[in-house]
Amino acid sequence: MLRLLAVQGTWNYERMLGVGMGYAAEPLLDDLKAVDPVRHGEAVARSVEFFNCNPYLAGLALGATARAEYEAVPGPQIVRLRTALCSPLGAMGDELFWAGLVPALIGAALIGVVLGAGWWAIVGFLVVYNGVRLWTSYWSLRLGLQSGMKVGAAIGSSWLPQAIERVGPAAAFAIGAAIPLVADWYLRPFGWSAGLGAAGVAMAGIALTRWFAPFLSTVRFAVAAMIFLLILRRVGV
Amino acid sequence: MNELTPGVIIPLLLWGTLVGLDLVSVPQAMISRPLVAGTVAGWLIGDVHAGLRIGVVFELFALDVLPVGAVRYPDYGPATVAAVVVGAGFPWQLGMGLSIALGLVLALLGGWTLQLVRRSNARAIQRRAAALAAGESRAIRRLQYGGLLRDAGRGLLLTLLGVVFALAIREHVHLDEQTHLALTLVAVGSALAAAANGAFRSSGRSARFKWLAAGAGAGVLLAVLT
């Protein structure tokens, strides 16, 4: 399971997670070497082919394909399983972690920091996040190994779809609460006029990057605004 | 704040390397989140408060990033570490603007270096394509360790470059107080725009938007009451 933590170690645009998956599969396929060395070589070669999904759910595909190799499922069928798992595992994992758990916990940590929890908010974020993440990796690998080619049905009847539905609203609420609190935390010492100025910058940033100049990311907007400000101050405006 | 001696700079470089590795390669434990990276960098420099304040601003920017699929995004980790070097030891209202400016440029540069590492990984894989097709485990291990090493080098170089620029800014860039304050306000305003953008994009027009609005209402209420 530890190797799953580095599944994106060789991330690239051609095979994406492929080589990382092969690295993680190595110890799982080891026993096959003694039983059927030819099959082992083929299995290792298959394990490094193109693969992409959310890294935290990669264990499902890894476990399922490893079991299929031991059950001597025909190679093309294993390749099809890997390909079929890419999109659902990517979508579910991204929804659960990147659009759900991470913003929910970051929002809670930001609220904690603003309310004076300091280090505790950050430690709490790291402990909860890594606890969930490590458990999910362990669970996904175990479920994949248990279900093999039937992994799709096993995912459908697991806790995953329900958790995705619940974590989204929690993330939205936490971020929604964090933004005004953080704004107040920074802008209150400056007073009303400066606060209105910063709010104006924020509005301009949202309007430009969302509607009028979508090619301008918020980072580029910020850099451009700072350069513009420095030029104005330099010429004495 | 501690003096910026090698005894402080070297741990900062190590921290920046770890943070750079954490973003994509290993272990994705979220130490690369600016909130964590900045606070620890502040602790290493002896100004946790500056690290926290700078980390929160970059965290707002990072909320606009959804790292799905092969999307390209800025690398805020090493950038936050370098930004804390600029802002540490000053009142946050004065030190934050310039530090955020440097950090944002470094974050964009960091995003570009990620592409270089990915292309370099692809070239290494192409060179060992025959060994991979033959199912050679040794080739897989070499590629994996090579990829990790490249990303660690990327994090180290990015942090080193950031720290060098940060020290140069501390030494040579002198702005008047009004400009410092205005830069800080622009940085905070832009960061709030980024966080709001990310929140709007994630919630769309679905039921999630109602939760976002409810959260915002609760946040405003709490801000008024505290």
Image (cartoon, rainbow, N blue to C red):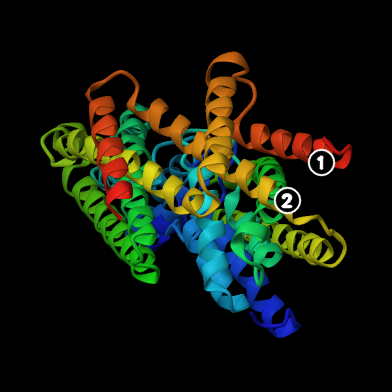
Checking the image for residue A233, the label placed there is 1
Q: Is residue B12 above or below residue B119?
A: below
Badge 2 marks a residue whose secondary structure is helix
Asked if disc 1 and disc 2 are in contact, CB closer than 8 Å, the reply is: yes
User: Which chain's residue wears label 1?
Assistant: A
- Indicate the quadrant containing the N terminus of chain A: top left, top right, bottom left or bottom right: bottom left
Q: CA distance from mark 1 to mark 2?
A: 9 Å
- Indicate the quadrant containing the C terminus of chain A: top left, top right, bottom left or bottom right: top right
Rendered location of residue A64, percent (x, y): 26, 43
Residue placed at 48% from the left, 55% from the top?
B33
Q: Residue furthest left?
A: A157
Residue placed at 45% from the left, 56% from the top?
B28
Residue wearing tag 2 = B178
User: Which chain's residue wears label 2?
Assistant: B
Does residue A47 appear to the left or right of B143 in the view shown?
Answer: left
Task: Tell me, yes or no, if residue A219 can be seen here.
Answer: yes
Badge 1 marks a residue whose secondary structure is helix
Q: Nearer the viewer, residue B105 or B118?
A: B105
